Amino acid sequence: NDWNRTMGLLSESKNPIISNIAKMASDLVGVTTEINPQLIRRIAPKAAAGWSKDTNGIYFRSKKHAGNEHVLAHETTHALTYFAINNPTAAQKPVVRRLDNLYRFVKTKLGARGKSVYGLRDLDEFVAEANSNPDFQKELSKIAYQKQTAWGAFTQAVADLLGIKNSNALT
């Protein structure tokens, strides 16, 4: 478990969003990573990996999953955003409301198209999946939302949530 080394490798991603997530997450303190198939089977039977708010650990079903860029970026996003979403500061509360409104809008739009998307499970999964899954990002870019795309609204809201001055860091 070497968080800085793991984030260093992820920051070399050809996907600029994943690269920037890794750069932001490299400052997180106390995050651990571990291959632990028994734990994953118990807490998330169908998942390749999971992040635990209780331990601040990312657990993988296998070495293959630990080396999967999308899986690692998804779980890293949970570590980066969970507390801001679920225990926001006064300044973050309106941003979380914006994100939640966007999530509900997207869920309605994609649901009307008959789409079953993992990122629509709840707000935390929406944020993690939108930050790590290029296919979900493309879907968001096709949805009109408040004079922009859902993807544009998403990147601005996450930038605001994390205190990033330039939302282009997420695109």
Image (cartoon, helix red, strand yellow):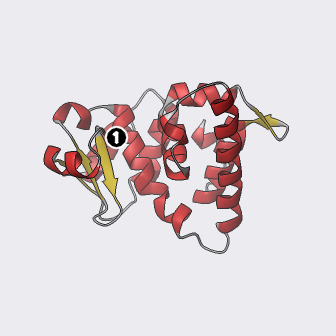
Residue 68, relative to residue 6: is it above or below?
above
Q: Residue 150: percent from the left, percent from the top?
A: 71, 37
Q: Where does residue 137 sit, x and y in percent of width and height?
A: 58, 30
| Left or right of residue 67: residue 153 | right
Please tell me which residue is depicted at 60% across the width and 73% down the height of the picture.
89
Q: Few, some or many C-alpha atoms within 10 Å of disc 1 (few <14, some 14-19, many ≥20)?
A: many
Residue at x 73%, y 30% (from the top left corner): 143
For mark 1, what is the residue? Answer: 72
Residue 85 at x, y percent in the picture: 55, 61
In the image: residue 63, left or right of residue 81 = left
Count of numbered tags:
1
Q: Is 28 left, or right, of 104 in this rendering?
A: left
Q: Residue furthest bottom?
A: 90
Please state which of residues 56 and 105 is positioned toward the viewer in this rendering: 105
Q: Quadrant of residue 153?
A: top right
Observer able to see residue 87: yes
Q: State the SS at label 1.
A: helix
Residue 60 location (% of width, % of height) = 23, 43
Amino acid type shown at disc 1: Leu
Q: Would residue 138 be found to the left or right of residue 77 on screen?
A: right
Q: Splitting the image into 4 quarters, where does residue 97 fall? A: bottom right
* Residue at the (40%, 59%) spot, across then down: 27
Visible residue check, residue 165: no
